[in-house]
Amino acid sequence: MRADRLVAILLLMQARGRVTAGQVADELEISVATARRDLEALSAAGVPVYPQPGRGGGWSLVGGARTDLTGLTAGEARALFLLAGPEARAAPELRSALRKLTRALPETFRAEAEAAAGAVLVDPARWGEREAPRDARVDLLQEAVVRRRKVRFGYGGRERLVDPWGLVDKSATWYLLAGTADGRRTFRVDRIAGAELTDLAADRPDELSLAEAWRETVELLERRRSSATATVLVDARLVPVLRDRFGRHLGPDVADAGDGRVRLTVTAHTPGALAEQLAGWAGSVEVEPDGADNVEVRAGLARIGRLLAERYG
């Protein structure tokens, strides 16, 4: 977890006074580029750390080489605890690190820091559901990422040996971004079978940005899921509701149809899937007749309508 690393870096700087990105990388078993990005993130978040270039330079806490964390202002302490707070829920090590950091703060700041740490709560369970226990595969893969070790597992009926680059939690579903013989790949963690941490060193590009890699992955997947397009007419008042329902699968262009309705484009991976998603809107949405995908979607809606009429009369 990145918040875990940020707290660890601060504690390391408290102990040593000044550190280089290379020293942080060695201590935390991450790449130099990652260590540099973490140090820059601390500075951008308002924590008083600054770089000193040149021979004998490095990163220090403002106030001198031996300054401890009591140099944090109230605002800086809040920024750090807000950054770490949501992730501390499932990480005992991070909670322990935050307690140590709290004890290092001036007495007047402790209450605000503790309040910031508890200001955000992440509840991954949907309404009517119980929270699922943390998947043990996530912990194993996280260890592999931190220790930079290859992982062997089964996926899609094949055995894989991959270089784990990072984990992404998307709406309580975990994904592993990894390097393979065929390039970068994304694996859904709950579909991984028999994950095994190996002793083989993993390769991870120094210039890798997990956020940028995930953004590219999302864009690619969304393009694959948007191969079918239909043009629909909908009452202008329903456009915000449709946007909330379809998200990025509803086109940005809105044209006035001249009868109180607007013309929109909506996408899905197949015309059949589009028909299923639009069927719930009944007469509120009309699919225009022209266009190959439109014809298939209209046929799919008619088929769904007949099935419902036969069953429910």
Image (cartoon, grey):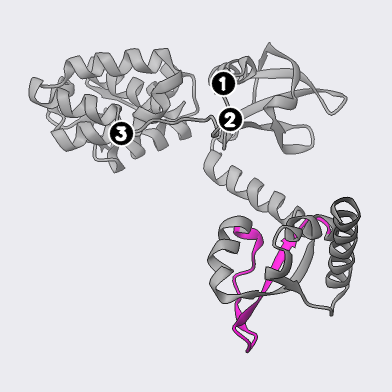
Q: Are marks 2 and 1 in contact (CB under 8 Å)?
A: yes
Residue 262, labelled with which disc? Answer: none
Residue 187 placed where, x, y %? 71, 32
The first of marks 1 and 3 along the sequence is 3
Residue 240 placed where, x, y %? 53, 65
Residue 76 placed where, x, y %? 20, 35
Instruction: Classify mark 1: helix, strand or loop.
Output: helix
> Which amino acid, mark 3?
Leu
Residue under label 1, please give it: 142
Residue 167, labelled with which disc? Answer: 2
Q: Is residue 23 positioned above or below 177 on the image? A: above
Residue 115 placed where, x, y %? 23, 28
Q: Nearer the viewer, mark 1 or mark 3?
A: 3
Residue under label 3, please give it: 82
Q: Which segment did they paint magenta? A: 247-270
Q: Is residue 237 positioned above or below 43 on the image? A: below
Q: Image point 57% across, 68% down: which residue?
A: 238
The quadrant in which residue 135 appears is: top right
Q: What distance separates the C-alpha of mark 2 from that of mark 3?
A: 21 Å
Instruction: Classify mark 2: helix, strand or loop.
Output: strand
